[in-house]
Amino acid sequence: MQCLPPTKFLTVFTAAAVLVTATYPIANAAKVEAATLDIGHNFTSSTLFIDSNLIPPSPSGSVGSKHVIEFINGGYKVYEKSTGALVESSTLDQFWLEAGVNFQGFTFDPRVVYDPFSQRWLAAAVDNPNANNQFLLAVSNSADPLSGWTGFAIDSDSSDQRWADFPTLGFDKSGVYLTANMFPQPGKNAASLETHILAIPKADLLGMNPTVAQATLFESNLIAQTGFSLQPSINLDNANAAVLLSSLNAQQLKPTRIENVATQPTLETTEPAIALDPFAPIFSADQPGPKQDLEIGGDRLSTHTVTQNGAVWGVQTVEQAGRAALRWFQIDAATGQLLQEGLIADPENDFYYGSIAVNDYEDVVIGFNASGPNQFVSAYAITGQTAGNATTFSDPLLLKAGVSDYEVTFGAGRNRWGDYSATTLDPADQLTFWTFQEYVSAEDRWSTQITELKLRPDFDPTQLVNAGFEAGLAGWLSRGNVQPVTAAIGADPVAGQFQAALATSGEVLGDDSLEAFLQLPPDSLGAIENTVGSAIRQSFFAQAGDILTLNWQLLTQGLALDPSTSAFVSISRLSQTFEVIETQLFNLLTDPDRLTGSQTFSFVVPTTGTYSLGIGLITADATETTQLLIDNVSLKPQPPTEVPEGGMGWGLALVGLGLGKKRLWRLLRLDRA
């Protein structure tokens, strides 16, 4: 067929192309603009018949402090992050050989992630399809991938009845997790599909002599128990929360949990499925001309999820009005509750093979492919900005335009594309993302594209913004029932027309759920079961001696306050990777004579750095109707002696929260600097 010029098949996406089902009404929409993406480095990395002879390429990639790594089926490349220069390249098999792995057949379906907390790279794959095969795992010797890797091969099936396919990779504070779909081997007795899950204590991989001797392989998990293509999470909270998710026919998510990975690992598969808006799976994507449609893998989660601020974010492909669309979701990591979901779709084009990254401000970037009857397969990205508890996406951004049609089956009859892509947060910059995508670079030729994306939000994330809530919840993150309100609620704002109202009424959150969201240590909110409440949070940069103040007021509707009710402020100092170094927690309800009228809280910043401000209201009484009003948050560089302060420094003990005398919470210093 004659190849048409690439401009013939470029579609300009309008705002109507982005259909977001989860929206949030803000007080003044004119003051909030969508974040935008700027393209930094943007280069083609690998190409069919040049760097690999395999289909599909299954590109995976990640970014460290100084390097960018891409794995594909058949290849491995390392680039210098600052310049984009290629500094190392080999075949995929050669990578595993140099890591010291004795594999069988050939290696395929690679994955790679960078752990910013241990400053190590982790890579995974499998070998020897359709026969006895192994999980392959490698850990870099340092943050520099050029310093070498230590690799391992672990039997995927002790019964030798099934073989592992489509491996996945994730980590949390204490563990590294791999999963695979287990298919019956030809000529063997196995009749059903299974999922096998491998859990390795992370500390065992980080010592002078890395080992997998304490690895646990959970076998014989039926698809009905765990779902298909189970995806671990990249836990950027650095918490012990191994939540693995799979899709159930584009209508539910099935959670699986691993606990106590460092001591006595256990697998929990009985947690109920999480209901989503019901869609249908879709298995093909359109392209111009008469060639076969592209095979796109259905609704399975094709790449890892991301855990940020106590929530798990993911993306999958679903069918919408006959087209492939991207459904994104946010799940509470502790409770499994659906926090929000949305759809990114276009009436003329298919969107598929999305991968997601999320920063600490809950800015979201999704990289994906798009094609249609008038567009060749191209690489795109889209960004979402979170205000309160709702995320709104901008228009898609073209990264690399496809130039021709594609049909490569090698006689198998399947025109496979994918099987996945990768998008990641730069560990050195919360506003920089990278995505690893495919596009058609010539007729019947796939190529991979590596793109650096610079996020320009509508506000400076290092500064306190929208401190009076005049723009709704823009700049703030929230959980539970939080709304911008006026004086109509029964109390005048301290300044302006709006204030934030945190309510105890609403969803059951659980104290551990709010602790993760507010970046608090475990059990700091006590042991109240079925805690109901709400919270808001914002990060900012402050100089030593700056004074943080806010106005608060408790509305009890004239009723007695339940003893379990607590209103509090948390202030945490953060590291460069946004990990909590130390935290203070302040009880606002220490004086029963000061529970009416507007009150002022103030805090003197003891050390220059990045901080997280959290404000919460919780109770164990589900009938409680108390509300906490917050307004006029400010940060000023004034001498600390001029303003009453909530605490002079990190060394002071703190009063308890008054959680029904459940516990006395004191200053906790975490040795993570």
Image (tube, rainbow, N blue to C red):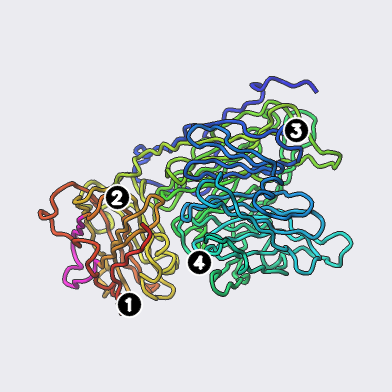
Label 3 crowd (10 A; few <14 / some 14-19 / many >=20): few
The amino acid at mark 3 is Phe
Separation of disc 1 and disc 2 at Cα? 30 Å
Instruction: Say if residue 301 shows up in the picture.
Output: yes
Which residue position holds label 4? 335
Indicate which label's residue lies in the foreground, 3 or 1.
3
Residue 82 in the image, given as x and y percentages of width and height:
48, 34
The amino acid at mark 1 is Arg
User: In the rendering, which numbered label is found on residue 663?
Assistant: 1
Separation of disc 4 and disc 1 at Cα? 22 Å
Element under label 4?
loop
Which residue position holds label 3? 49
Is 528 part of what is drawn in magenta? Answer: no
Indicate which label's residue lies in the foreground, 4 or 3.
3
Element under label 1?
loop
Q: Quadrant of the N terminus?
A: top right
- Most extreme residue toward the left is 642
Determine contact: label 4, label 3, CB under 8 Å: no
Which residue position holds label 2? 609
When asked about the image quadrant of residue 184, the answer is: bottom right
Indicate which label's residue lies in the foreground, 2 or 4.
2
Determine contact: label 2, label 3, CB under 8 Å: no
Separation of disc 2 and disc 4 at Cα? 32 Å
The amino acid at mark 4 is Thr
Of residue 41 and residue 256, the one placed in the foreground of this image is: 41
Q: Is residue 51 above or below residue 470?
A: above
Please tell me which residue is depicted at 30% across the width and 72% down the height of the picture: 665
Residue 491 in the image, given as x and y percentages of width and height:
23, 57
Element under label 2?
strand
Please tell me which residue is depicted at 30% across the width and 80% down the height of the picture: 661
Residue 300 in the image, given as x and y percentages of width and height:
67, 53
**668 relative to 365 in the view: left or right:** left
